[in-house]
Image: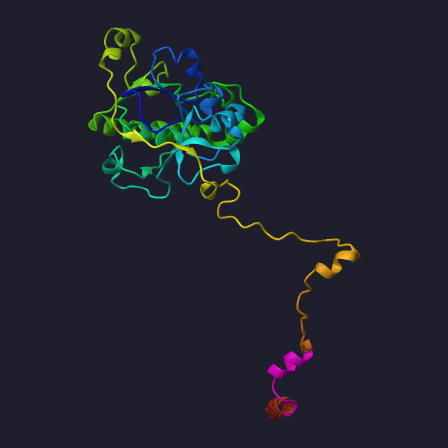
């Protein structure tokens, strides 16, 4: 994939909620942008956005897409999965640590780094889309609610997906709250969002996408952005990395049983010298008074007792 501008100022953003199965994301003739695990339902999008390393949650479709040079992958520049044969990557600056007190000044400002939201890939993705000139986003599969973990996705849930069950509702609620705050900022910047059958939660603050309007008017209003997207066809070996190898030093292996013929290769630890330890009695006596002082105190105590007895008898 060569350097290029985004094809249109409008796109379909495919998230992984179950409502994604109720629409045909290709039917509008617009660029299709898949978010993270939505690649398991939409295996050949035009763009695939993920704010993390490639992992098992992306499934077999994700592995194939990562090395498919016809699919542009948009990722943070420190999240390259080098062992997955990456091709056609767009690398972005992404700030995962700062919590912006004045978020409205930084969000959708046209500058990098992008700020982190609660659902990393989707909030990272919409910032990139607006950054490259997309004015209208038609959301699909952004349900923001689920009755169970198995009903949360547009694809069949596997055993490894259940690792996220413990906080899936918290993530959905946090994402909904963030998008409610981000949407007015997007409007102020001149961007538009539409919900394509995403359901009541998202449509409580974002207008519904009207297919009739699209056929009669919307598709005739499309323009082309001007910002060139730099696509890295093949990542240099020096830039490749994996989640395991980044800033992690593996601990040395412990040899429990070593054959005699390799004993000479083992580095012996330096000989430890143990100084003789004082006995408990010695330690205690060192802290006590000398024997003479002790006997003197005992005799004085006895004399006092004898004097007390004499005085009592005299009375």
The residue furthest right is: 260
State the residue at coordinates (28%, 31%): 131
Colouring style: rainbow
Image-based side of 89 in relation to 155, left or right: left
Estimate the x, y position of residue 254 in percent, counting from the top left: 67, 53
- In this orientation, which residue lies closer to the viewer: 223 or 60? 223
- The residue closer to the viewer here, 223 or 76, is 223
* Residue in view at x 75 percent, y 53 percent: 257
x and y percent of residue 216 in the render? 25, 6
Residue found at x 32% / y 19%: 11
**Magenta span has 267?**
no
Q: Quick check: is 289 in the magenta stretch?
A: yes
- Furthest residue toward front: 2
Which quadrant of the structure image shows residue 207?
A: top left
Q: Is residue 109 left or right of residue 169?
A: left
Q: Is residue 119 visible in this depiction of the protein?
A: no
For the C terminus, give its image quadrant.
bottom right
Report the front residue among 263 and 148: 263
Res 212 quadrant in image: top left
Q: Residue at 67%, 74% (x, y): give it.
A: 273
Where residue 293 appears, as percent x and y from the top left, is 61, 91
Quarter of the image where the N terminus is located: top left
Q: Is residue 223 above or below residue 244?
A: above
The boundaries of the magenta stretch are 281-292
Instruction: Determine the main secondary structure of the stretch shown in magenta.
Output: helix
User: Does residue 250 show up?
Assistant: yes
Give how far across and how far down residue 238 sits, in percent. 46, 44
Quarter-of-image position of residue 133: top left
Q: How many marks?
A: 0
């Amino acid at each position: 994939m060569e350097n290029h501008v985004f094809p249109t100022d409008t796109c379909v953003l495919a998230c992984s909620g179950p409502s994604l199965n109720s629409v045909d994301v290709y039917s509008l003739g617009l660029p299709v942008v898949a978010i993270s695990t939505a690649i398991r339902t939409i295996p050949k999008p035009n763009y695939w956005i993920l704010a993390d390393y490639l992992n098992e949650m992306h499934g077999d479709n994700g592995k194939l897409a990562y090395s498919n040079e016809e699919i542009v992958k948009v990722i943070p520049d420190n999240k390259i999965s080098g062992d997955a044969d990456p091709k056609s990557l767009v690398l972005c600056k992404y700030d995962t640590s700062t919590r912006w007190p004045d978020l409205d000044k930084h969000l959708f400002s046209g500058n990098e780094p992008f700020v982190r939201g609660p659902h990393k890939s989707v909030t990272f993705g919409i910032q990139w889309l607006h950054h490259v000139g997309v004015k209208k986003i038609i959301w699909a599969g952004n349900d923001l609610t689920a009755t169970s973990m198995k009903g949360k996705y547009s694809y069949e849930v596997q055993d490894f997906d259940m690792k996220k069950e413990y906080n899936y509702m918290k993530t959905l609620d946090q994402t909904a709250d963030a998008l409610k705050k981000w949407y007015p900022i997007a409007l102020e910047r001149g961007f538009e969002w539409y919900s394509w059958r995403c359901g009541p939660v998202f449509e409580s603050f974002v207008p519904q996408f009207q297919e009739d309007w699209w056929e009669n008017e919307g598709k005739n209003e499309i323009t082309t952005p001007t910002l060139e997207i730099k696509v890295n066809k093949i990542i240099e070996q020096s830039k490749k990395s994996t989640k395991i190898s980044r800033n992690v030093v593996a601990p040395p292996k412990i040899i429990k049983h070593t054959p005699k013929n390799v004993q000479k290769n083992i580095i012996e630890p330096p000989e430890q010298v143990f100084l003789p330890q004082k006995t408990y009695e010695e330690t205690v006596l060192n802290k006590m008074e000398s024997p003479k002082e002790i006997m003197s105190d005992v005799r004085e105590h006895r004399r006092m007792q004898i004097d007390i007895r004499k005085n009592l008898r005299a009375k």
